[in-house]
């Protein structure tokens, strides 16, 4: 699990100082943050393996869903982990909309992301609670962020007590393992075996790394356009993945060490 480190404390301190400086215009704060925030890089020797992995799987997008009210500030300041947003100065200036009062998986220091499609089970529960799809947006982030920033990932929902986050190429491969299950589910090479697999990333993600904003309906599209943000409608991101019947029983996928067999099976599909 991503925890408080010297890096985390440094990020928190810089954010706190930037937003609590009297008389500082928001635009200057944004520029300062992009220029000054530290990055926790991945281990250099792993970069080539992870880059090849992204190409091998054909992963084009890393996904994050959020309330639409948060999008203008995300596109200005970046995607900031919740723990930092809870600091008093940031809370006053950014007024973030939290979708829950408590993070049960205790990953407040991390941005929770997904490969290729949203974690639809979690997304569905939050949308039902809000009683509207118009107040939600899905961000498409360039997958290269995991070539730059330290991350951990889980094979299933990170809130599960049996699903522990871990770093590295071997853990990434476990997200796309179990050749027999992948055959049964007919998932795409770019889709993790379990639709609730997560990427946990603790560096503030720059707005330049956010390629697209997706919404479901015209109302949300207009709301963002009025605030100078171009968005696209994509209904499939607001629907369950095609293999949802398999996951109705709250199955927890822990991964296997058969990635070689997965590649042999999926090679003809690419």
Image (spheres, rainbow, N blue to C red):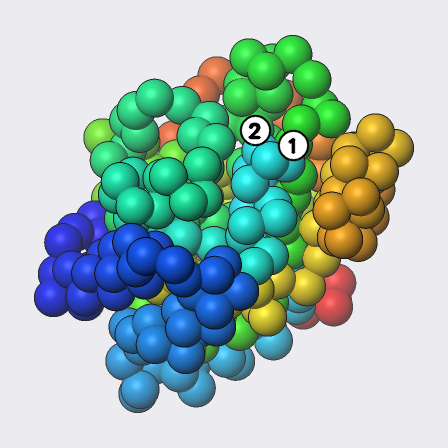
Q: Is residue 41 left or right of residue 253?
A: left
Q: Position of residue 121 (x, y in %)?
A: 54, 26
In percent of the image, x 84 and y 38: which residue is there? Answer: 222
Q: Is residue 251 above or below residue 229?
A: above
- Residue 87 x/y as whole percent: 26, 43
Q: In this orientation, which residue lies closer to the viewer: 270 or 47? A: 47
Q: Residue at x 61, y 20 (%)?
A: 127
Q: Residue at 54% across / 21% down in the picture?
A: 126
Q: Residues within 10 Å of mark 1 (few under 14, many from 20)?
A: many
Crowding at mark 2 (Cα within 10 Å: few <14, some 14-19, many 20+)? some
Eyeballing the image, is 128 above or below 63? above
Residue 251 falls left or right of residue 214: left
Can residue 1 be seen by looking at this rendering? yes
Which residue corresponds to mark 2?
Answer: 123
**What is the count of numbered marks?**
2
Counting residues from the start of the chain, the first of labels 1 and 2 encountered is 2
- Circles 1, 2 touching at the beta carbon (< 8 Å): yes
- Identify which residue, 230 or 25, lies in the foreground: 25
Please tell me whether residue 85 is drawn above or below residue 40 in the rendered image. above
**Where residue 135 sits in the image (x, y, percent)?**
67, 27
Res 11 visible: no
Query: What residue do we see at 54% from left, 52% from top?
Result: 74
Q: Is residue 109 left or right of residue 92?
A: left
The correct choice, above or below, for 103 with respect to 40 in the image is above
Instruction: Report the Cα–Cα distance between label 1 and label 2.
Output: 9 Å
Q: Residue furthest front?
A: 23
Q: Position of residue 136 (x, y in %)?
A: 65, 32
- The quarter of the picture where residue 9 lies is bottom left
Circle number at residue 136: 1
Image-quadrant location for residue 250:
top left
């Amino acid at each position: 699990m991503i925890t408080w480190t010297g890096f985390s404390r440094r990020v928190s301190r810089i954010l706190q100082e930037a937003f609590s400086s009297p008389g500082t215009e928001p635009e200057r704060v944004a520029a300062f943050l992009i220029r000054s925030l530290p990055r926790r890089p991945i281990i250099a020797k792993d970069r080539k393996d992870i880059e090849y992995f992204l190409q091998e799987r054909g992963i084009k997008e890393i996904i994050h869903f959020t309330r639409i009210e948060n999008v203008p500030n995300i596109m200005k300041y970046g995607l900031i982990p919740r723990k930092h947003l809870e600091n008093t100065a940031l809370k006053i200036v950014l007024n973030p909309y939290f979708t829950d009062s408590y993070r049960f998986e205790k990953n407040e220091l991390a941005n929770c992301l997904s490969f290729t499609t949203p974690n639809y089970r979690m997304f569905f529960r939050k949308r039902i609670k809000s009683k509207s799809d118009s107040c939600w947006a899905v961000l498409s982030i360039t997958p290269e962020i995991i070539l730059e920033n330290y991350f951990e990932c889980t094979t299933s929902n990170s809130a599960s007590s049996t699903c522990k986050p871990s770093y590295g190429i071997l853990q990434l491969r476990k997200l796309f393992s179990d050749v027999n299950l992948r055959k049964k589910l007919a998932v795409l090479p770019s889709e993790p075996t379990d639709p609730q697999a997560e990427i946990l990333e603790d560096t503030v993600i720059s707005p330049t790394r956010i390629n697209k904003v997706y919404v479901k309906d015209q109302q949300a599209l207009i709301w963002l356009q009025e605030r100078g943000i171009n968005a696209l409608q994509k209904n499939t991101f607001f629907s369950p993945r095609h293999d949802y019947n398999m996951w109705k029983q709250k199955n927890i996928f822990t991964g296997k060490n058969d990635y070689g067999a997965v590649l042999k099976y999926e090679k003809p599909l690419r």
